[in-house]
Image: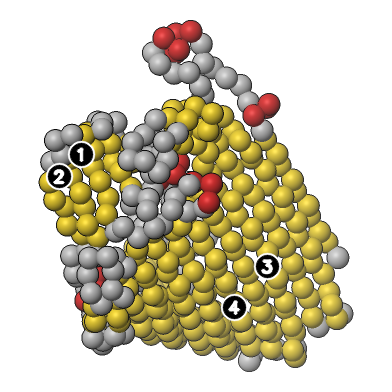
Amino acid sequence: FTGTFIVDYGGRDLQSNNIDDRLRSRGATTAAFVKSNRDVAFGLGGPITRDKLWFFADARQWEAFAQFPGIYYNRLQGSLFYDPDLSRPGISGPRTTAPGIRLTWQASPKNKITGSFRYEKTCNCYFQLLQGTMAPEAAQHDRYRVHIGQVTWSNPVSNRLLLQAGVLSNWGVFFRDTTPDQGVNDATTISVLDRLRNLRYNAPISLNHTPYQQTNGVASLSYITGAHAFKVDGFFMRAQRTQTAKTTSPAVAYTFAGRVPELVTYYAYPNLVKNGIDQGAFYVQDQWTLQNLTLSAGVRLDLLRGFAPDTQSPAGQWVPQRNHPAVRGTVRWKDVNPRLGAAYNLFGSDRTAIKVNVGRFITFEPLGGLAASTVPANLIVTNATRTWVDGN
């Protein structure tokens, strides 16, 4: 058995401060101080059954929080106005916990199976404070709960033929929320932007909740002789998510100039969006060696279809329930991508080679990309802004 343990720590007492009279004269009264900075990790592996079954387990937890100069909570939280509470500075940073385990099983002399599972819990807490344009009570927490399970299989049928296959499933939830220490009451608290200060306070402008699921499968056959290295492969992926965008219950946000109202923005929330992607790919390639010359050729067929199930967004403060019918092909793409290459061993010594390659490639289409922007629930107007004139 073999193991590793690592721990790191940093804190404010280990940090220097370069604020001097020259900087104070320009308005800088405090530096960006480390609040906490630590990392604890371990890993342990070894055999469960001799020459048959092995394991590796690990876990890690780390965080890095800092206090940012000039960012303070609102002393008048719950009112429509802002006054910095100098006793409550803003603190922001990430915190992640990530355990995992992997098993390797030599089922027979030619069949090896590996399985792994990993869980990750992350909070990018108050992440918008980095922008310097939000009071802490108006910042959001980006949170992730991620589960990843994977199984792979390989079989060297002979010294020329290799079979491989695998499946991966990734599921979890991404959401933006607030915590009780921010003093945000969903029923009454309204987000306010002070245009003169370029500062948002009182509450976040929007929140969301997005569970998702993705499954990948791949299988390949490789046939290798002295002169040829031939491979054929197939890949499939299905991914889908459900995103709910919302704000605090009043479903409005204000824009002030200091203490003078200027604008009010109305939100058509909550807005529910469901979408998914089916993606497949098949390719064939061969590498052929003729003395000092190696030629390679391949072709790949890429298929992608976006889809949107029927959705019903619940009624909000300013809008009734909205119904969107299913769409089977938000995008439909088919691409044939060839690739050619050559390498020449210039002097036959395997030390100097000339290589040339040409190919056609496509970019990755994420679940939240173009396939999502064409979903009916994403094509509606979700906010409207009106002038607000208030004489007193």
Alpha-carbon distance for marks 2 and 4?
A: 55 Å
**Mark closer to the chain start, 3 or 2:** 3
> Mark 3, mark 2: which one is toward the viewer?
2
Q: Are marks 2 and 4 in contact (CB under 8 Å)?
A: no
Identify the image quadrant of the N terminus: bottom right
Alpha-carbon distance for marks 1 and 3?
A: 52 Å
Identify the image quadrant of the C terminus: top left
Q: Are marks 4 and 1 in contact (CB under 8 Å)?
A: no
**Mark closer to the chain start, 4 or 3:** 3
Label at residue 388: 2
Query: Which residue bears the numbered disc 3?
Result: 100
Q: Where in the figure is residue 180, as x and y percent of width and height? A: 53, 51
Query: Which residue bears the numbered disc 4?
Result: 150
- Examine the rendered structure and indicate whether residue 135 appears above or below residue 166: above
Q: Are marks 1 and 2 in contact (CB under 8 Å)?
A: yes
Q: Secondary structure at mark 2?
A: loop
Residue type at numbered disc 4? Gln
Query: Which residue bears the numbered disc 1?
Result: 261
Please state if 317 lies on the left or on the right of 26 as rendered: left
**Mark closer to the chain start, 1 or 3:** 3
Please state if 160 lies on the left or on the right of 199 as rendered: right
Name the foreground residue: 361 vs 263: 263
Q: Secondary structure at mark 1?
A: strand
Q: How is the image coloured?
A: secondary structure
Q: Residue at x 68, y 26 (%)?
A: 13
Name the foreground residue: 328 vs 106: 328
